[in-house]
Amino acid sequence: MRISTTVSFLINQLSNQKWKAPSSLDRRWRLYHKGVLCLFGRVETTQEAGAWNWSDNRMDQYQVEQLKSMRNELSRFMLMYKFALNELETKIDILKEEFRILHDYNPIENTKSRVKSPESILNKLQRKGHDITFSNIKRNVKDIAGLRITCSFISDIYQISDMLQRQRDLKVLEIKDYIKNPKSNGYRSLHILVEIPVFMSDREEHVAVEIQIRTIAMDFWASLEHKIYYKHNKSVPPHLLRELKEAAESAIALDHKMERLHLEMAAMNVKDEEESATQLTINDQQFSIPKVLLDLLGNDRSKSDTVSLSN
């Protein structure tokens, strides 16, 4: 069962950056306020919350301050995950820039990040059967922050995974390889759960982020499967499930074929470079100068000539 609409109302209100505590309470505000005081450790039971003074449907100053304090706690908690994603995205941007400038090929095609909504977090915690507290959320909901990386080829996935795991400030908590061991429905992806330090103004927090790395074909299949499940309210007809599984097999077959073509093209390029290399003899010893190096030297010489002419 999903969390009540009153708790959803609280979460949406408190997570709103423009939220202001109301001076008066309608029935809905009163209900949600009683129901979530336990989440923030203000009271131990909802019965105790019901003992608060609700006369004239007015909030006293103490209750207003309590709501403001709750909002700040929720904002700080959610910001931790946002900042963790920011740090991880910076790491990915650095790798992309390095590959763009120094290498012939960039294995990272695209990235996408998201932070779960507070309501979604509480729904997942409730499904797991845990009490709603911040410590339980942090301990039991590990995919609050998520980063998805798409690549062209399967080999790229493991290359990126290795690069991230070598970074000393990332602590790998768990790896789930759904490429080598796909799910029963055909889902494939590499999931890496990492912990990253986030330095706030008054503390250091270690925040979990789930990284999903997959090929473009895998991502296309997963997106389509997700849409179908939501369209059918997660009760998908059997014939569609069979076709989805067949589509997953077609996608992985395409990945393997494109990887083979990619490797063949790379081998052909190496061979062409070797055949086009210029032979240079120095002291009766022959050296092969790759065409790309001669082109580079030629470009540098042209630039220097242009500069000398302009002077």
Image (tube, rainbow, N blue to C red):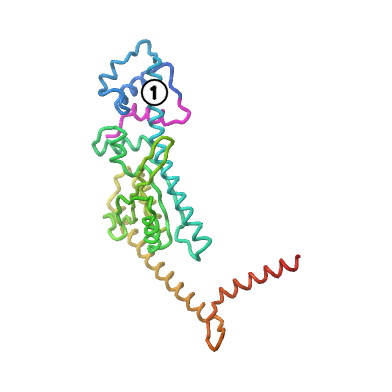
x, y (%) of residue 191?
33, 53
Where, quadrant-wise, is the C terminus in this rendering? Answer: bottom right
Q: Residue at x 35, y 48 (%)?
A: 210
Residue extending furthest toward the top: 56
Q: Nearer the viewer, residue 303 or 4?
A: 303
Residue at (30%, 35%) from the top-left corner? Answer: 135
Q: Is residue 62 depicted above or below 124 in this figure?
A: above
In depth, the one of 46 and 257 nearer the eye is: 46
Mark 1 lies on residue: 67
* Rendering coords of residue 161 (x, y %): 37, 57
Q: Is 2 included in the stretch rendered in magenta?
A: yes
Name the quarter where the N terminus is drawn: top left
Decide if residue 91 is on the left or right side of residue 44. right
* Drawn side of residue 293 relative to residue 157, left or right: right
List the single residue furthest toward the bottom: 284
Position of residue 272 relative to residue 221, above or below, is below
Q: Classify mark 1: residues with Cα within 10 Å, few (<14), some (14-19) or many (20+).
A: many
Q: Residue 309: horizontal and vertical position, in percent? A: 75, 68
- Choose between 301 and 10: the one closer to the eye: 301
> Based on the displayed image, in which of its 4 quarters is residue 299 positioned?
bottom right
- Residue 124 higher or lower than 32, as above or below: below
Mark 1 belongs to which amino acid? Answer: Leu
Q: Which residue of the protein is positioned furthest toward the front in this rendering?
A: 283
**Helix, strand or loop for disc 1:** helix
Tally of numbered discs: 1
- Which segment is the magenta one? 1-19
Q: Residue at x 57, y 83 (%)?
A: 280
